[in-house]
Image: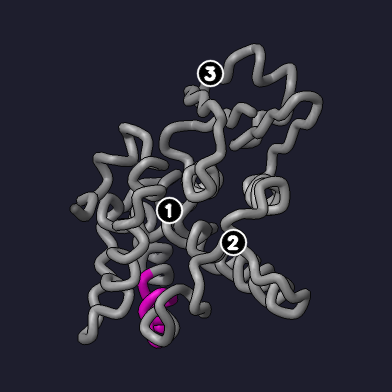
Amino acid sequence: MTLFSPPACPLSHSARFVLHEKAIVSEVEFYDPNDPPEELLELNPTGISPTLVERDLVLYDSRIIMEYLDERFPHPPLHQMDPVSRASARMIIKRIDQDWYPLLNEILLNGEKKSVRAKKLLREGLIAASPIFSDRPFFMSEEFSLIDCTIAPLLWRLPSIGIDISTPNDAITNYAQRIFSRPAFKSSLSEVESEMGDIPR
């Protein structure tokens, strides 16, 4: 199993987080998204990242990759077992992808100075959700899940793009530190990503 991943791609980071959380034996091939290797383009002509290759299977949507890994390697489970909870988790991930990731991508693509509005909207959206971060140990769950794997790469990048998510009760910061302290999260970081924030001891 090989995961082709740009070293700074947040969606690829989510998939790497799942790989390490499940201790899946695999290779991570980092590459320059502006100059993808020929081997990758033959497997995935779209160039969309990340790309997971296992024998004849080629997947190139991060959320599909995460779901596949969770089903292919069921322990520890990162989804609730009952259909209602699984569907609810998928809806939460879809909302994160629709509401927050486009703003992050705009900031990363255009730079901080050209993305003042996007920075403001992203910060306000996260702050508005602060009660959710403090309500349970993990995001809307008592157990660590794919939702946390989805949101962690976004939160990790906030200091590097100048977004402060401090609240009076430090709800988001405390949640983030819990996730960043996990050995799997630390292992999932590329060298580029390691420089974006302070890794908890």
Upstream in sequence: badge 3 or badge 2: 3
Question: Disc 1 residue type?
Answer: Pro
Q: What residue type is labelled 2?
A: Leu
State yes or no: discs 1 and 2 in contact (Cβ < 8 Å): no
Q: In this view, does 78 lie above or below 12?
A: below
Whether 186 is among the magenta residues is: no
Query: Which amino acid is tagged 3?
Result: Asp
Give neighbour class at mark 2: few <14, some 14-19, many 20+ (Cα, 10 Å): many
Q: What stretch is highlighted in magenta?
A: 123-131
Helix or strand or loop: what does disc 3 sit on? Answer: loop
Q: Which of marks 1 and 2 is nearer the N terminus?
A: 2
Can you tell which mark lies on residue 78? 2
Residue pointed to by mark 1? 153
Q: Which mark is residue 35?
A: 3
The Cα–Cα distance between marks 3 and 2, rounded to whole angstroms, is 33 Å
* Mark 3–mark 1 distance (CA, rounded to whole Å): 23 Å
